[in-house]
Image (tube, rainbow, N blue to C red):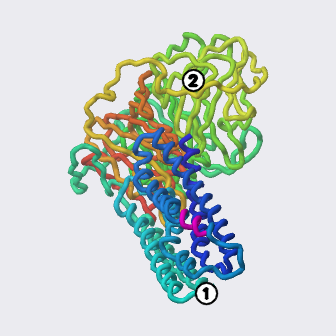
Amino acid sequence: MYGTITGLELAFALIGFLIAWLTGNKASNLVYSGSSDRLRRKMAGLLVWTCASALSALVVLLAIGWIMANQPAVFWEDRLLIHAPLIAVPQLAVWCYSVPKLWRWKRGLLRSQDAPDPKLLADLAAPGTVLPFQAAAAGMGTVFYFLLVAPFPLGPLDVFTPLLVCLLTLAGLWMLHDRRWQRISRSAPPVSRSRRRTFGKLAALCGAAAAAGIAFYAGMWESRLPDRLNMATGPMDFGTGTILSHDESRAVSIAMLTGPRDEIPDRRIELVAEKTTVRLASGKTIDAWTFNGELPGPELRFKHNELVEVTLTNRNIEEGVTIHWHGLDVPNAEDGVAGATQDAVMPGQSHKYRFRAEQVGTFWYHSHQHSAEAVSKGLFGALIVEPADENQDSAPQKDLTVMTHIWDGTGFTIGADEGIRRETVAPGTSVRLRLINTDNWVRQTYNLQGTPFRVSAIDGTELHEPGELRDTELQLTTGGRYDVTFTMPDHPVYLKVGSGRELGLLMSPDGSGEVPAASEPAAVFDPTHYGTRTAIPFGADSAFDREFTMTIDNNLGFYDGKMGMVYTLNGDVFPDTPMFMVREGELVKVKIVNRGSVDHPMHLHGHHALVLSRNGEPADGSPWWTDTLDVQPGESYEIAFRADNPGIWMDHCHNLTHAEIGMSMHLMYEGFTTLYTIGRESDNHPE
Ligand code: C2O
Ligand code: CU
């Protein structure tokens, strides 16, 4: 609903501005009417336009009212303090001052072809009569600007510059009107020097365009990424905690923070990255970036606490490759982020990762170099960590990974399957489906039909006593994972993926069976109150060492020399987004607020955060640990984590196309630094 309301607000701010502008022009042109009759008709027309302008203003004000009634203050402070007065004050002036006068004058006019009374013309031209109409346009125009470029968090420069422009415009108009009024008062009748007026308007327009052009080029130039940038430096945010003395020159390099380097690994894996042509299950071939020639990359399965060594070799991907273990909280130097924890692996080069798989659950891996492009083209795969002591001869088990993606030119797929995938599952088997969404911009939906089920894990962490669900839709944004479990009945069970009928996983005792007719799910799964409480290491009333706020918005802005819609974190895009600074051992709380109009799955590397509340409601079900939290428009979350994994950790939106245009920041531990750099001159482009 918030998204719809803010969309309406934006649309009507634009419509309202255009209408108010035309209305202002009409008000200013009344004096050039020639005859009384013409003037009377023009006045009637103006009143109609004034009503239209007021109506659009009302829609915007109602939208603000709705937001105030339904959302916390962070969503409407600026709207109440800035937008509402900018809209309401000029409208009040129009309706309380200009309209009654016009109405009176109009009633006194005769339907005659004679020129109107010179005294009336002077009154019509008075600045006080015309300016309120133009102020309505200027006010609404400024609101429209503020909606596109929210001055949030409220900063004096961001707020006052547009207000000043608005005031100066009105002051200029006042002066023009005043001059004209004096002329008309002295010497009747007014002449429409339309050539001169057009010329004046053109000159004003050119001036405005030139000013906008200069601002545009300055913004573009200023936003260019530097040639080289060290991610350990930059603006710092200490939250509510003490200021940390972050002395770069004495800091320890994160390159020291490796996994065990001397022990013999339990598992060795080779992953070769290459550009190649791959055939999907449907026979269609696509050009892809692959690990070991497979799409998606090979599924990696480790046992809990195994020491793993993965050798990544880049055969021919000129853009470079890395591997990030999404959701596995590995030591920092193994995290696989180009320019932060390693250099990108260029063609012909190799890199070894070593870490212990310390968490059991569903994860995935992907390149974190040009990640938006790399992941969309195929440099990713599933990563499953199984319990070490899994009892092989207990009840039969079926473990299926459902990784959804869109390949170049395909619709949604499950792995490389474009249609219905069939699995033979004997009745009584305990089934675990591991849902992983890898696609940007998509909140993927999953409906399990034919059996009750449980959501047993979120983002690789088991839930405590998850209750039985049916008729409940699951939704995952990119990067998130749900494990779904159930016991296979003696009839087919269908996992419908997406909204159509043509993609899904059909499980049946003999591998046959029909896809059931689509049914409308009754509810959408919400983890806030799901499962039951169990011991947690900290909670909402713990004493936090540091509290941060992360406010998300979308703005018209610049990133790396280009203009467009950007997604801001605390009002900025990378590298201006401040780093959250912490000291090892601290307990940290982050409040995430999405003021924008689209979903943002926020992903913090190296840590799992406990969700404390969602939209102010305490999360009181099973402890809900997350690494990729979908924050929808209008939502706010409080999450907490222990800063127990030192280093430099990306914290970004996992709509990788958002991260690619600057929706990225990082968590920085006091006393550490990195040797690696990013920027135009470097090979490292993590997003
Ligand atoms: Cu899965 Cu920083 O990403
Ligand atoms: Cu995003």
At x 58%, y 45%, the residue is 4
- Residue type at mark 1 is Val
Q: Is residue 520 magenta?
A: no
Look at mark 1 in the image and give the residue it sits on: 191
Look at mark 2 in the image and give the residue it sits on: 484
| Residue 429 placement: quadrant | top right
- The part of the chain drawn in magenta is 100-105
Please state if 89 lies on the left or on the right of 442 as rendered: left
Query: If you read the primary sequence from the N terminus, does the residue marked by circle 2 or circle 1 appear first?
Result: 1
x then y, percent, for residue 492? 72, 18
Under tag 2, what secondary structure?
A: strand
x then y, percent, for residue 153? 38, 53
x then y, percent, for residue 436? 57, 34
Note whether residue 313 is visible. Answer: no
| Above/below status of 95 relative to 291 | below
**Residue situated in front as seen by the camera: 362 or 630:** 630
**Residue situated in front as seen by the camera: 174 or 259:** 174
